[in-house]
Amino acid sequence: AMSKSAVKISSDLLSNPLCEQEPGFLEMVTAFDTAMKRMDSFNQEKVSWLWLRKGRAGSLSHPFSRFSSVFPSLNMAVKRREQTLQDYKRLQSKVEKYEEKERTGPVLAKLHQ
């Protein structure tokens, strides 16, 4: 998102009337625009590479682990997500177990909790 914003800013600067009046400014803004477009394409390649390499939604949790000391709230969110996922799987297995049992009063009560 940052590189997209930088590309937008550089293209807006290029359309500024000051670029027509000052050749030095035009040269500087053109260099900036080229650099921002190269950075954006580089970032897009890296993101595509990450998704193709891992091929699953969990692939983004590994790069986040490097920043856990910098962004402790991110680390806590990842831990909460993992805990919630484990809880869901545990409860799903309980539901499946009760659905396989004979449908008596206590089993139906536990199933609808």
Image (spheres, rainbow, N blue to C red):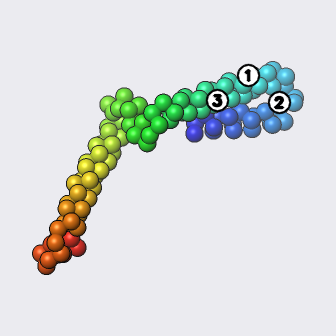
Q: Is residue 94 left or right of residue 68?
A: left
Where is residue 25, by image quadrant? top right
Q: Residues within 10 Å of mark 2 (few under 14, many from 20)?
A: some
**Residue 11: assigned label:** none
Using the image, determine if residue 112 lies above or below residue 59: below
Residue drawn at 37 percent across, 28 percent down? 66
Where is residue 41, by image quadrant? top right
Q: Secondary structure at mark 2?
A: helix
**Of the two numbered discs 2 and 1 in the rendering, the one whose residue sits closer to the viewer:** 1
Q: Amino acid at mark 1?
A: Ala
Q: Is residue 85 left or right of residue 53?
A: left
Q: Could you tell which of marks 1 and 3 lies nearer the N-terminus?
A: 1
Q: Position of residue 63 (x, y in %)?
A: 41, 31
Q: Which residue is mark 3?
A: 41
Q: Which residue is mark 2?
A: 19
Q: Could you tell which of marks 3 and 2 lies nearer the N-terminus?
A: 2
Q: Amino acid at mark 3?
A: Ser
Q: Amino acid at mark 2?
A: Cys
Residue nearest the viewer, comparing 89 with 96 = 96
- Is any part of residue 80 visible from this angle? no
Q: Position of residue 92 (x, y in %)?
A: 26, 59
Q: How many marks?
A: 3
* Image quarter hosting the N terminus: top right
Give the CA distance from mark 3 to mark 2: 25 Å
**Of the two numbered discs 3 and 2 in the rendering, the one whose residue sits closer to the viewer:** 3
Q: Is residue 56 left or right of residue 75?
A: right
Residue nearest the viewer, comparing 80 with 69 = 80
Residue drawn at 53 percent across, 30 percent down? 49
Residue nearest the viewer, comparing 97 with 68 = 97
Using the image, determine if residue 104 lies above or below residue 16: below
Q: Which residue is mark 1?
A: 31
